[in-house]
Amino acid sequence: MKVIVVGTSHAGYEAIETLLKEQPDAELHLYERGSTASFLSCGIQSYLEGISESLDSLHYATEASYLEQKINVHMNSDVIGINPDAKTITVKTIDGETEENYDKLIITPGANPIELPIPGTDLNNVFYVRGRDWAGEIKNRMAKSKKAVVVGGGYIGIEVAEAFAKAGIETTVVDALGRVLNTYLDKEFTDVLENHLEQKGLSVRTGEMVKEITGENGAVAKVVTDKDEYEVDTVIMATGVRPNTKWLQGVVELDQDGTVIIDEYMETSQKDIFAAGDATKVPFAPNNGSKLIALASNARRQGVVAAKNIVEKKVKMPAVSGTSGLSLFDYNFASTGVKDCDSDTIDAEVASKYVEEKIRPAFMGDEDSVLMKIHFEKDSHRIVGAQLMSTYDITAAINTLSVCISAEWTLEQLALGDFFFQPGYNRPWNFLNVLAQEALGETFGSDKMLF
């Protein structure tokens, strides 16, 4: 059996590694359009900040490591077409186009940066945040930059803006939405973060639409919005991504948003063609539906599931909640499930509760607090989302709440949930217990008074 995997990022990597174990006698071929394999884009911020010393350290596999595993790896090979009837792919290289046959095919098309339809994006010193080459160019530019504008206040934009600000570069984040991290955190949290960013010297301009980038001598000079103008020497475009699936039109069934439609076993509308990664949706546990959530963790799961079903459909993709975490200067935050912006995707009426709580007893001599919010069905009390933030690193606790969502726990169950107590770590009632208790309007014990 000949199996072709297209793409070496998270989904493709996990698919090929799983196939090595599941189908040891298969002929495995891995195609990568770039010159390097399996780059960890999630590590770009660490490289920009000098934590990771080189781009080479951000690869979790290489052409050499694949070859050592006896995988037929094809670099600089862009798969530009598929013929499902003939079971062939069309591959474009520097030498031209060729066709290769397959028995089973796993495609991981990924996503491309969204390019705003405005003048000036083709000027020098305008950068996108996607992949190894762009990361290297941005890092080189940082040594020369004095004033930068980051267009987009989502995860990617905020990470790059933080790196620029820490490097002493005058940095402004411009976002068309009313808040930074709008789809990741609710207003209670972003209000705190935006104030914190300003204190750290990073300017935030929300509710502004970029209209034009003007230049001098072929390089950027100003970013013009509908409300202001900003003098710059560097512009970072971080306005999101969209599925890289135009080349798949007419080959497999696509949704209106361009994602590849797959079943619960990761198979597309074409038999023996499976798809995974940022160009597909995942089952969404809070509403038992599906959602596009471009996270490495989701892509990894999908890669495993696709490979395990390559011969026989036996493993379903588990429902996830879009669980993620990040740090921003002094704060650590994490979220899972629905937020205010998408709570209307739940069939039942959704309520929420915001709580601020001390992490440890007062006698431990510290003042670490956690800001928390939980979303739940108003009548059934089923938990459907949560957010946590603190200057102390409490982000791992969001995994507990993600499991609660998947297990369809209620507030009542979390309120009395079993968590260990040791004063160096927490209080007799863990802050997650307290969050559920507060949502129920029923706190227990005398923690508030003595601890």
Image (tube, rainbow, N blue to C red):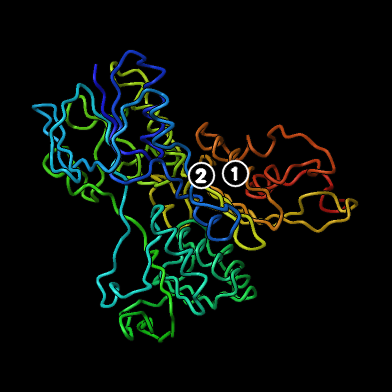
Residue 269 visible in image? yes
Q: Position of residue 442 (x, y in %)?
A: 70, 46
Of 129 and 28, the residue lying toward us: 28
Residue 377 visible in image? no
Q: Position of residue 358 (x, y in %)?
A: 77, 54
Q: Position of residue 332 (x, y in %)?
A: 63, 55
Q: Which residue shows up at 36% across the image and 71% down it?
A: 126
Q: CA distance from mark 2 to mark 1?
A: 7 Å
Above/below status of 33 relative to 237: above
Mark 2 touching mark 1, by CB under 8 A?
Answer: yes
Q: Position of residue 168 (x, y in %)?
A: 60, 74
Label 2 is placed on what type of residue? Thr
Q: Quadrant of the N terminus?
A: top left
* Mark 2 crowdedness (10 Å alpha carbons): few <14, some 14-19, many ≥20: many
Give the residue pinned by disc 2: 323
Q: Earlier in the sequence, mark 2 or mark 1?
A: 2
Task: Say what secondary structure mark 2 lies in.
Answer: loop
Q: Viewed as shown, does residue 408 lie left or right of 16?
A: right
Q: Which residue shows up at 67% across the image and 50% down it?
A: 438
Above/below status of 189 relative to 301: below
Of 28 and 352, the residue lying toward us: 28
